[in-house]
Amino acid sequence: MSNLQLAIQFFLQIAIILMFCRIVGLIAAKFGQPQVVAEMIAGVLLGPSLFGAIAPEWSAALFPKDSMKVLFPASQLGLALYMFIVGLEFRMDIVRERFRASVAVSFAGMAAPFILGALLGWYFKTHTSLFPAPTSLPNAAIFMGASMCITAFPMLARIIHFKGLAGTVMGTVAIGAGAIDDAMAWMLLAIVLAGFKGDASHALVNIGGAAAYVALTLLVIRPILAKWASRIEARGVVSDGEYAFLLSLMCLGAWWTDYIELHAVFGAFVMGAAMPRGLISRTLIERTQPLAVALLLPLFFTFSGLNTRIGSLNTAVLWLMCAAVLAAAIAGKGLACWAAARAAGVPNREALGIGVLMNARGLMELIIINIGLQNGIISQELFAILTIMAVITTLMASPIFDRLTSPARPAP
Amino acid sequence: MSNLQLAIQFFLQIAIILMFCRIVGLIAAKFGQPQVVAEMIAGVLLGPSLFGAIAPEWSAALFPKDSMKVLFPASQLGLALYMFIVGLEFRMDIVRERFRASVAVSFAGMAAPFILGALLGWYFKTHTSLFPAPTSLPNAAIFMGASMCITAFPMLARIIHFKGLAGTVMGTVAIGAGAIDDAMAWMLLAIVLAGFKGDASHALVNIGGAAAYVALTLLVIRPILAKWASRIEARGVVSDGEYAFLLSLMCLGAWWTDYIELHAVFGAFVMGAAMPRGLISRTLIERTQPLAVALLLPLFFTFSGLNTRIGSLNTAVLWLMCAAVLAAAIAGKGLACWAAARAAGVPNREALGIGVLMNARGLMELIIINIGLQNGIISQELFAILTIMAVITTLMASPIFDRLTSPARPAP
């Protein structure tokens, strides 16, 4: 396809993706589901699991292979902008506030699903072909463990904010634990990615490059920006030039962590976390979020859905594996977090709320398994299984959570 | 390049483009030039005219041919979003207010540059090789005429708004005349594009498709949206879903006008003009403009600059042509508009301001000549000449305009 044809196709794809996401969103809203859940599902439905299965010619006409050359970079840009916003919203101070309960919940929310996941990974690697041959046994176990640990941190934060629970025990503990878990899961993924590349020098470049990036960003760029911020705060407005400059820092971070074969999302998230809080972080979110979330992020869900072949789960054994993953995910994360919250003295209803919120995998799970698939760590079948797990744990969250918290809210 | 390599390259390109645009912007600001002028120049400097000439290996490493497959669609998306905003800001009511003077200025601002441009086009086609062989004599004359008529309408509107001149005679007349001229120049371009495709059936598809689109958008979609708008106004906020839906309408319009081989910018602009005014247009601008203008639009300037080879003007004759184009552009547009404004009873200082503003070609000229180059209507050399004309007429505007209007403003 010529550049012009690619551009024409790109406009058509965006138009159809956005409309379809909103139609699914309208249906999902009737079941009390947020838009992000609708977009996860819309992406899967637009892929070979539904649209590609019932109308293969139309699907090939709308998503020709060549057009992935545009859709993938654009979806990565959307994802990086989103992770930048997540980094901007990341608040270390909240973790400190309720430190003991946060750490207890987060430890339970890591250890239990990691152990269950690692066991499943070991079983899958030794007894099935769900992991490709090049993936070693330790890598399979760690990847599966890490992918179980994921919490939909941005979604969790958004639900808590949306329900006005930000100041409550439940809100504080869930956000604190979610933030710690998230950071840990990404570190585990970084280890898997570094280890997966095989030779030690490669792993060294990965880990060294990542450590250097985090150190440079948090210890050099952050203080410089903080100093600069006071002048901007005094002026009261972030100029267009300053905004573009901060965006280019984000792109530079995304590029670097992509370049050292980690992933763009790390760089974007860390750069977001390094931005000065207050006027600057607020302005960055205000200006970046609407278009990035409305226009570019749905492209990521669609790209992810195009890789999901639920039809590849074509045997009873594979569906059994899927059920096992789902059970381990819910028991490991949801139940363990509830138990830990109870043990740390959180009342039962609130502990249940924490468990349900921590259990939702959301977008984060899709990101981590897309990275796994891109790097050939997992098979198409395992990708489909983990997508189903991500969708179901996320679908569970809103209705249960609404029922748990509804007495606290006046009827609308 | 693999999809992943394309994504990595894309992040690096964005980071460098944004930083470079801002560095040029800082220098340009010292000479009283707005950011948009800086980005036009930055694009040219990043292309083969400077960066590619002094560091060809680095230039090839940063902008490999394959990466244009991403950069072009992304830059087109940025451009379409920008033209959507221009459409959102388009106000027919202002044109009506000062109708007589607006029409006089706009007529002068069309007729004089069109005749001078058409004469130059005729000369270039018959005596030089600045037009490729397939371009017919009428098409050469009309394209050159249309490209001379261009006014940097969005820039003009922004300068007038920024200087607080929106209610004045000068502001109203300039915006009214600019809007009329702009619409006319685009129509001429549509005729050239339709005619250029050769066979009559093709031209019919073009013109018929465009007319059908404008009719559908303004006569069907606009009233439906207007009805819907009253409910949104009563609620007081545009939901995320409504925002995404309106964006998808824009993409659909851009796709259609691209698909019928007109250009995405038409569809985006008309869809913007069809959006309900008030809360909806304000919200759309607020949410779309920051990221689109800061992140995506600079990609268009860079893509345009990558096509500009000022070095291809390698003979005295070509530079003479360039001088002739520049002289015709300034005389035809700037002087004619000043004279028409005087004749319509506008005081001299304000008439001069109108002439200077109307004379600036800005981004719009780049869009029209990029379309000409994409479609093979003009040669690389003529593209370079018209780029220089666009940059110089735009560079002239701010300093002269500031001098003309400064007594009206208190010193800062």
Image (cartoon, coloured by chain):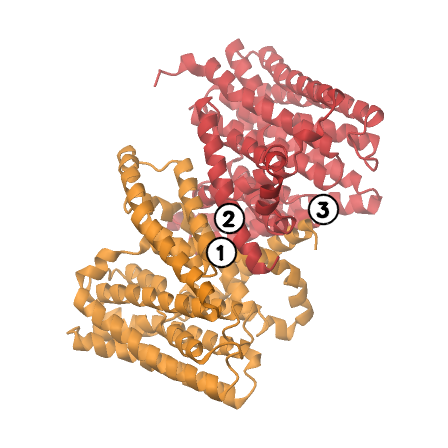
Chain colours: A red, B orange
Could you tell me residue A218's position as x and y percent? 60, 44
Q: Are marks 2 and 1 in contact (CB under 8 Å)?
A: yes
Q: Quadrant of residue A334?
A: top right
Crowding around mark 2 (Cα neighbors within 10 Å: few <14, some 14 to 19, many 20+) is: many
The chain holding disc 1 is B
Gap in angstroms between the C-alphas marked 2 and 3:
32 Å
Q: Which mark is residue A12?
A: 2
Residue position for label 3: A261
Q: Nearer the viewer, mark 2 or mark 3?
A: 2
Could you tell me residue B287's position as x and y percent? 40, 45
Above or below residue B167? Residue B284 is: above
Gap in angstroms between the C-alphas marked 3 and 1:
38 Å
Q: Which mark is residue B259?
A: 1
Q: Nearer the viewer, residue B292 or B69?
A: B69
The chain holding disc 3 is A
Quarter of the image with the N terminus of chain B in it: bottom right
Residue flagged by tag 3: what amino acid is it? Glu
Gap in angstroms between the C-alphas marked 2 and 1:
10 Å
Residue flagged by tag 1: what amino acid is it? Tyr
Q: Nearer the viewer, mark 3 or mark 1?
A: 1
Residue at 45 percent across and 53 percent down: it is B256
The reply to whether label 3 and label 1 mark residues of one chain is no
Crowding around mark 3 (Cα neighbors within 10 Å: few <14, some 14 to 19, many 20+) is: many
